[in-house]
Amino acid sequence: MVFQDPHACLNPKMSISEAIADPLLIHHIANKGEAREYCRQLLEQVGLSPAEKYQNRLPHELSGGEQQRVAIARALALKPKVLICDESVSMLDAEIQSEILTLLKKLQIQLGLSILFITHDLSVASGFCHRIIVLDNGKIVEEGLGKELLDKPRTSITKKLVAACPRLP
């Protein structure tokens, strides 16, 4: 799972490599040496290169976008089939959002990942997701392709979400 606020979900006393390696060690998947090497590979894979520049740093020494990349690397450490991204780009500025979304698309293809992307921003969802499902009080009220939902919203909640989307002329 990749959360909205990476700073809040990274232990401030653990180095980046310790944070990424932690699930591997907890589940006895790797020893410390193997975990450290795999951590370097994951850092490179998420665009934190060279890994040696990042692995011994603490979370507060990284930008928000770099922290989010660390959170993604940690989420990938156990080789999941599904990655859950809960508002994972909402705290980032537009340029970094775009970089993270591009990274997620690349990882989705490279690793054969399914991504459940939770967001209130239909404009982001429509450009990133294959299919969009709109929930209201925990129930599915509308689903379809992003362009369809943006152009012809049917339910009141979808209309509100579309109205809240920044739209370019």
Image (tube, grey):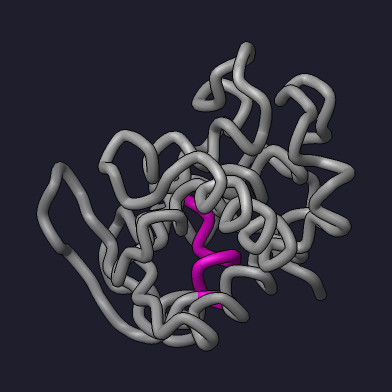
Magenta span: 120-128
Residue 121, image x, y percentages: 53, 55
Is 123 in the magenta?
yes
Instruction: Report the side of 158 relative to 15 (left or right).
Output: left
Instruction: Give percent across and percent down for residue 2.
Output: 46, 46
User: Dividing the picture into quarters, in which one does residue 113 lie?
Assistant: bottom left
Task: Answer with the quarter of the image where residue 143 lies.
Answer: bottom left
Nearest the viewer among 12 and 99 is 12
Answer with left or right where residue 147 lies relative to residue 67.
Answer: left
Q: Is residue 116 above or below residue 111?
A: above
Q: Secondary structure of the magenta portion, mostly? A: helix
Quick one: which residue is furthest to the left in this view?
139
Rendered residue at 22%/55% (across/down): 135
Per the image, is 112 magenta? no
The vertical placement of 161 against 18, above or below, is below
* Residue 79, position as x, y percentages in the image: 37, 65
- The one nearer the camera, 101 or 48, is 48
Considering every residue shown, the one lying at the far top of the view is 13
Residue drawn 46% across the image and 81% down it: 111
Going 79% across and 28% down the picture, which residue do you hit?
Answer: 57
